[in-house]
Image (cartoon, helix red, strand yellow):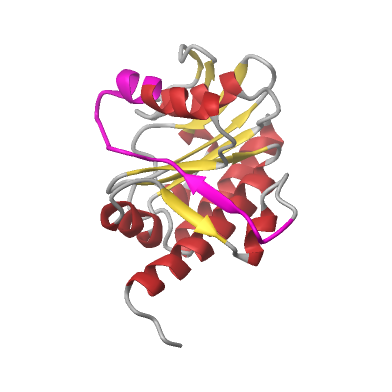
């Protein structure tokens, strides 16, 4: 557990420095074992995390260990862990690119023909389209979680967006989840520049 906490502290610091986790936004988690998940506590600043900023919850969201309250969005992390046994980390950021593209798009974001799509496991050619589901944001985490779960069950999905909120993605390791964040951020920026008539 100490190793995972140390790794998440470092990731939080790096993501904050990149401007992807401003103020107390976002949340980071890692699966400790089959039934337990480490997640950042509600209101914690991800650029200045300490060991006390993490709590341990079970896959139903019950607090197992820790003195603070789990993130309000714990259910969104847990639905990913419950659906995909191989997932060991879920990262959620409030970056400018992910927030803006979620506001400017009328529906799901389609990423097509980019070489960097091969950063996602299972994609071996740029000649493909990756759909990133976009959901309306809600403070009702239970209903939002049910809506998101319905989409994740039926498609090959590597992440999703909440409107005016940010991006969720995951991986078999914390490093893989971080790499997916980088890939999504690059691709979202490309799409935003195209929307803005980018000519180089």
What residue lies at 63% left-to-right and 25% top-to-bottom? 84
Q: Work out whether residue 115 or residue 15 is closer to the camera in this orientation and state it.
A: 115
| Residue occupying the far bottom of the picture | 200
Q: Do we see residue 55 in this rendering?
A: no
Q: Do we see residue 160 in this rendering?
A: yes
What range is drawn magenta here?
A: 125-146
Number of numbered tags placed on the structure image: 0
Q: Is residue 178 left or right of residue 134?
A: right
Please check the rendered image and state whether residue 109 is part of the magenta-colored stretch, yes or no. no
What x and y, as percent, mark residue 157? 56, 38
Q: Is residue 42 placed above or below 198 in the rendered structure?
A: above
Quarter holding residue 116: bottom right
What x and y, as percent, mark residue 81? 58, 24
Q: Work out whether residue 22 or residue 142 is closer to the camera in this orientation and state it.
A: 142
What x and y, as percent, mark residue 62? 46, 11
Q: Is residue 93 placed above or below 194 in the rendered structure?
A: above
What residue lies at 64% left-to-right and 43% top-to-bottom? 6
Please check the rendered image and state whether residue 142 is part of the magenta-colored stretch, yes or no. yes
Q: Is residue 149 placed above or below 5 in the rendered structure?
A: above
What x and y, as percent, mark residue 112? 54, 59
Q: Is residue 22 placed above or below 3 in the rendered structure?
A: below
Q: Work out whether residue 44 or residue 113 is closer to the camera in this orientation and state it.
A: 113
Quarter holding the N terminus is top right
């Amino acid at each position: 557990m100490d190793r995972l906490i140390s790794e998440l502290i470092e990731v939080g610091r790096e993501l904050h420095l990149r401007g992807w986790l401003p103020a107390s936004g976002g949340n980071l988690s890692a699966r400790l074992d089959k039934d337990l998940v480490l997640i950042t506590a509600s209101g914690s600043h991800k650029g200045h995390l300490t060991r006390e900023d993490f709590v341990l919850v079970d896959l139903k969201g019950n607090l197992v260990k820790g003195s603070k309250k789990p993130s309000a969005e714990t259910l969104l992390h847990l639905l990913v862990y419950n659906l995909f046994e191989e997932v060991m980390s879920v990262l959620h950021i409030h970056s400018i690119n992910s927030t803006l593209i979620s506001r400017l798009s009328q529906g799901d974001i389609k990423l097509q023909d980019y070489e960097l799509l091969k950063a996602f496991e299972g994609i071996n050619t740029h000649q493909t389209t990756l759909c990133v589901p976009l959901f309306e944001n809600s403070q009702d985490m239970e209903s939002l979680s049910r809506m998101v779960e319905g989409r994740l069950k039926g498609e090959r999905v590597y992440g999703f967006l909440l409107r005016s909120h940010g991006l969720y993605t995951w991986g078999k390791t914390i490093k893989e989840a971080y790499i997916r964040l980088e890939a999504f951020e690059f691709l979202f920026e490309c799409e935003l520049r195209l929307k803005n008539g980018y000519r180089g």
